[in-house]
Every structure is written in C-alpha cells, then in structure tokens.
Image (cartoon, grey):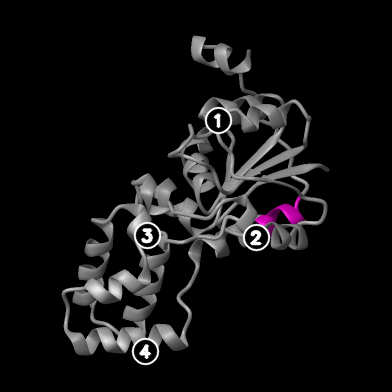
C-alpha cells in the first residue's frame, strides 16, 4: 500500500520512514505536488508540511482530486492540519490535537503552525517556533504553576503579534514585559524541561494511524473542473 508523505520541518525524513515502513517521503508540498503524486496512483497521501510563502500553497482541489480518484488523503500537524480541517466534510482525514483545534474553530489563523526553516540540504530544520508550540509549552508551564494565568495570557498575546519568522522561546524570554522573577522561573524550567513540540507529536499520531490502518477512500466525490484547475492540470 504505497503512501506518499509530504513532510519537512515538523519531522525528519528518517523518523518518518522509521515510524511508517515503506513511506515514500517527499519535501513539503507546494502547488502541483499533490497533483503530480496522484499520477503515481498511491493508495494514500499524507500531508504534514507545505510551502505557503515563497511559492503557492497546495490547492484544496488537488487534495479533492486525490479523494475523487479513490486515494485516502490524511493531514496533521501543520499545513496538513489546516487542509484537513477545511476539507473534512469532503473526506480528508485529520489527526492530532492541532487538527481538532482548527476543526472546532478554536484556532483560526494559519500562521499558528508556520515556522521558518532551513533548506533541504540542512534537513528543513526549523529556526523559529510555531505559535501552537509556544501555546502548548506555556499552557504546561501554567498548569505546573511555573507562571501565573495572567503571565500566560500576556506571553501568548505578545507572541501572536510577531511575524511568524520572529517567534522563538529566546525572544519571548528576552522581551516579555512581565515580572523578572517569574521569567527567571520560566527560563529555568525550560532549561530542565524541554517544551512540548505539539506539531511533531501530532505528526507521530498520524504516522501511527497510517501504520496501523489500511484505510482507503470510499468517498463519492466529483470535483468541478474550473478554469483555474484546468490550467493546473494542463
């Protein structure tokens, strides 16, 4: 059962292959990549990471075309969570907490999952921290009483106001306008307790689902061949 997985900064390709035997690992998806994958007739396509700034993002209709052709399409963690929440009613299968938050409308901004990352030669290593990961870490710090609820809210609002490329734990600790004593507690805690990586955890949940399931698409769907889609298909 051939499964194509589009992944980049969320998980290393080697880990994807270790968690999902036989996975055909591809770089983050951009417009046209899923369409090209459809031509290979895989049984499943899993979207984790996708481009969105320096090149056009993967189109919804590419994913819908895959479902129309009988390919099971999954998403989680990053671009995959966004698209799965948007296309769940049409048969795309989402996994993980981030997908659920988008599906419920708790998260609405697409930059919640955005990160800056290195090129392919450096393994797409992230160089900023996704807002969903900052949220997850700060929520844990609040539950463990490292920071107060008020400080938690202040830090979230501060990070939300930054461009996604500029969001890091280091900047948050350096610029947060909260009590220095409380920030020192948070800094010490982070040094001894690595903050949770919600995106990576969700990607692993998806790969576990794919590893244990032979799900196929059974959705009856007909995608309108709009002018724009015809231009993409060629």
Residue at 55%, 25% in the rendered image: 61
**Cα gap from disc 1 to disc 4, whole angstroms:** 43 Å
What is the total number of numbered labels drawn onto the structure image?
A: 4
Specify whether 114 is left or right of 216: left
Q: Is residue 79 magenta?
A: no
Residue 37 screen position, x and y as percent: 71, 32
Which segment is the magenta one? 207-213
Which element carries disc 4, helix, strand or loop? Answer: helix
- What residue is disc 4 on? 188
Residue 199 percent across, percent down from the top left? 51, 60
| Mark 2 element type | loop
Image-quadrant location for residue 46: top right
Q: Which residue corresponds to the image point at 63% horizontal and 24% vertical from the top-left?
A: 65
**Viewer-closest of 115 and 62:** 115
- SS assignment at label 3: helix
- Residue beneath label 1, please? 31
Precedes in sequence: disc 4 or disc 3 = 3
The residue closer to the viewer here, 225 or 7, is: 7
- Alpha carbon separation for disc pair 2 and 1: 22 Å
Residue labelled with disc 2: 12
Label 3 near label 1: C-beta < 8 Å?
no
* Cα separation between marks 1 and 3: 24 Å
User: Disc 2 or 1, which lies upstream in sequence?
Assistant: 2
Q: CA distance from mark 4 to mark 2?
A: 28 Å
| Residue neighbourhood size for the residue with mark 1, other residues' Cα within 10 Å, grouped as few (<14), some (14–19), many (≥20) | some
Residue in the image at 57% along x and 12% along y: 230
């Amino acid at each position: 059962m051939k499964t194509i997985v589009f992944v980049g900064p969320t998980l290393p390709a080697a880990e994807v292959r270790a968690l999902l035997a036989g996975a055909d690992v591809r770089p983050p998806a951009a417009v046209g990549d899923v369409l090209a994958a459809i031509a290979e007739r895989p049984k499943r396509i899993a979207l984790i990471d996708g481009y969105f700034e320096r090149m056009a993002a993967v189109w919804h209709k590419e994913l819908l075309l895959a479902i129309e052709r009988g390919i099971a399409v999954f998403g989680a963690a990053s671009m995959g969570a966004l698209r799965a929440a948007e296309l769940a009613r049409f048969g795309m299968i989402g996994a993980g907490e981030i997908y659920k938050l988008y599906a419920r409308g708790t998260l609405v901004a697409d930059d919640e999952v955005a990160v800056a990352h290195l090129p392919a030669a450096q393994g797409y290593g992230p160089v900023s921290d996704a807002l969903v990961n900052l949220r997850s870490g700060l929520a844990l710090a609040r539950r463990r009483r490292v920071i107060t609820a008020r400080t938690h809210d202040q830090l979230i609002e501060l990070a939300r106001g930054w461009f996604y490329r500029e969001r890091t734990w280091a900047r948050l600790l350096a610029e947060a306008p909260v009590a220095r004593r409380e920030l020192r507690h948070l800094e010490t805690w982070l040094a001894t307790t690595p903050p949770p990586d919600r995106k990576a955890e969700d990607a692993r949940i998806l790969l576990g689902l794919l590893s244990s399931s032979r799900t196929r698409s059974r959705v009856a769907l007909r995608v309108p061949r709009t002018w724009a889609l015809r231009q993409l298909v060629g």
